[in-house]
Image (spheres, rainbow, N blue to C red):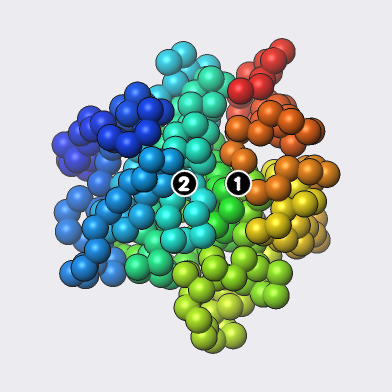
Amino acid sequence: MRMLTLVLAFSIIMLVSGSVMAEANPEVCNLWPDGGMPGAKEVNFEEKVDSGGHISGISVPELHYYPAEKQTSDATIVICPGGGYAVLSFEKEGIEIAKWFNSQGMNAFVVKNRLKEYGQPYPLADVQRAIRLVRKNSDQYNINPNKIGVMGFSAGGHLAASASVLYNEKAYEMEDDREISARPDFSVLVYPVITMGQETHWGSRENLIGKNPSQDLIDKYCTEKQIDKNTPPAILIHSSDDGVVPVANPILYYQSLIANKVDAEMHIYNTGGHGYGMRKKSGTVQYWQENLAKWLAERKYTLPKANPGF
């Protein structure tokens, strides 16, 4: 019955803004199809998609499924696009990334989560729900329920890191999901916001936890402070000259992973700036996806490839 409900909730839609978005034509699932969305409220805004594929005003969270044309891996990835918790860079840091994972033989999912109009804990609730749906329906997707990773960019990196350290947090209550783990099995964090402390990206912090948050709330979403020995393995990607999210962010997370004896790898490139996705074609940062492909292959999530670039 659960499977039937989920299958009925899926429909094929076409996003209408941006060439890549129009061509991708994914399967799309409403994350909360039965009226059980936590934090539901009447809204006075509407969802918009600009010419660059940025989505704002999200009130109906979704999960977009991109199956590999030739699946060679039983692992999968749940992707959280960035955008400062104000918008989602859905094309550059969602669809394009999913298609790269497809090229590696992996099925992929992109989360369209709620943003500043809702604030915490609702983005976390959306990604927890996404991970549980994927795990619950792993047979349908032909994936291993113990090989589900989470990936995020910038503020989406903070959301992915939050999913990695706050997986026991009850961001929502739903009886059908109580016995399903929200813990990702690995994480990929690309120019991520990690801390809510002095090295944070202030726009992301304000949009998530408000202008005057309590110290307890700040500490809760300082993901580097929530790491323990059960935190999933992670690979972190950043650039020294990132002028938006200070490079201290991934360093804090990496140091805490190492202190807790968690498998961790970090690549900090000399130049690259911020927000490049997979579009950077100059400098050593352009090879970050090759390093990611090697990391995935070494851990048996994908098959090794001679030329893993995008």
**Left or right of residue 124: residue 117:** left
On the rendered image, what quadrant is the C terminus found in? Answer: top right
The residue lying at 36 percent from left, 55 percent from top is 56
Q: Quarter-wise, where is residue 291 in the image?
A: top right
Q: From this view, report whether residue 224 is shown above or below residue 215.
A: above
Residue 206 at x, y = what percent?
Answer: 51, 73
The residue lying at 28 percent from left, 66 percent from top is 38
Q: Residue furthest right?
A: 270
Camera-side residue of 237 and 283: 283
Camera-side residue of 174 and 99: 99
Q: Which residue is mark 2?
A: 89
Residue 143 in sight: no
Q: CA distance from mark 1 to mark 2?
A: 9 Å
At label 1, the amino acid type is Gly
On the rendered image, what quadrant is the N terminus found in? Answer: top left
- Number of callouts in the render? 2
Instruction: Point out the tag, 1 or 2, that comes first from the N-terminus.
Output: 2
| Element type where label 2 sits in the image | strand
At label 2, the amino acid type is Ser
Residue 237 at x, y = what percent?
Answer: 71, 44
**Left or right of residue 278: residue 135:** left
Q: From this view, report whether residue 217 is shown above or below residue 70.
A: below
Q: Which residue is mark 1?
A: 275
